[in-house]
Amino acid sequence: MKKGFFIVMIITILGFICPSIAEDKVTITVNQFVSHVALDAAYNGLVKSLEERDILPNKVKIIMANAQGNIGNSAQIAKHQASAKPEFMVAIATPSAQTLMKAKTDTSTLAFLAVSDPEAINLTNRADIIGVADNPPIEELIEKITQIFPDIKNIGVIFNYGEINSIKTVERLEKVLKDRNIILKKIAITNSNDIKNAFNKLIGEVNLIYIPQDNTVVSALASMVSMSKANKIPLIANDPTLVDQGVMMALGTNYFRSGEQLGNMIADLIEGKKLEKNIQNTNIKELKINDEVVREFGIVIPENIKRGEN
């Protein structure tokens, strides 16, 4: 078995005292692509909702594995988990959803979280797939940014060209900015080691930097925040969980709530209830502003934005 291969943490509720009872439990496997604040929040929300519905630990066992940001690991995890023929195979992030799609059998339901564009990776229109799409509200975020920075001319973005969700997000961002005569400077990377060089290319070229829901980029957020502060270039995002890490402002999915939403969908199916929709959009958006960064950078936030108004 390769060093660093797949199980970073395993939470398996097996009923050690009475194994025969454990065999009757519904098995849920989780393939999380990487550990970072957003994906961890999604997983925690999933677990909490199952606990609150009294599904976990009495009726369910969870087997959780983390691919550590490596697509090869994710594929091996997917094959290993599929061989157990679980009732539900949960993918957290787009790369994990892609590997589970290839590995799953007809006996398992694929359930996904933290996927921005499920249609782009053929997750829609199938009875054996459920999930919560985050669908980042890019237009709303940029509308608020233009209120804060009415003279803004350039925005930068760093993204992994190997993540289809990032490509689609950057395409949307570019269109939104073009309609407002704002230039988008794009820097593509292949791994987190490229972040420093990519950021340096944006210094002096852009007024602020957008962080997409890109697992490679978010995994290197601490480095980006450090460079942001050193060069007084604010960071913005559609992931509110990043604000506490040093991003100036974000508007979008609350990943913990998305995890709860998927958990309730799974609980409904376990209880024999029919889902209104197999693929649901996240039902909660959140605006967060980092007041410390705002003060440090000397930025003035209009009162209507502070109150969460348009």
Image: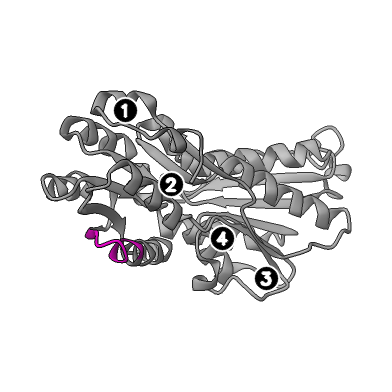
Give the CA separation, mark 3 to mark 2: 24 Å
The secondary structure type at the circle numbered 2 is loop
Q: Is residue 180 magenta?
A: yes
Please tell me which residue lies in front, 18 or 281: 281
Give the CA separation, mark 3 to mark 4: 11 Å
Give the CA separation, mark 1 to mark 3: 48 Å
Residue type at mark 1 is Val
Bounds of the magenta segment: 176-185
Give the CA separation, mark 1 to mark 2: 30 Å
The correct choice, above or below, for 187 with respect to 129 in the image is above
User: Which badge, 1 or 3, is on the more N-terminal residue?
Assistant: 3
Residue type at mark 3 is Thr
Q: Nearer the viewer, mark 4 or mark 1?
A: 1
Q: Residue at x 31, y 34 (%)?
A: 222
Crowdedness near tag 3: few (<14), some (14–19) or many (≥20) residues, C-alpha within 10 Å: some
Q: From the viewer's perspective, is 210 left or right of 31?
A: left
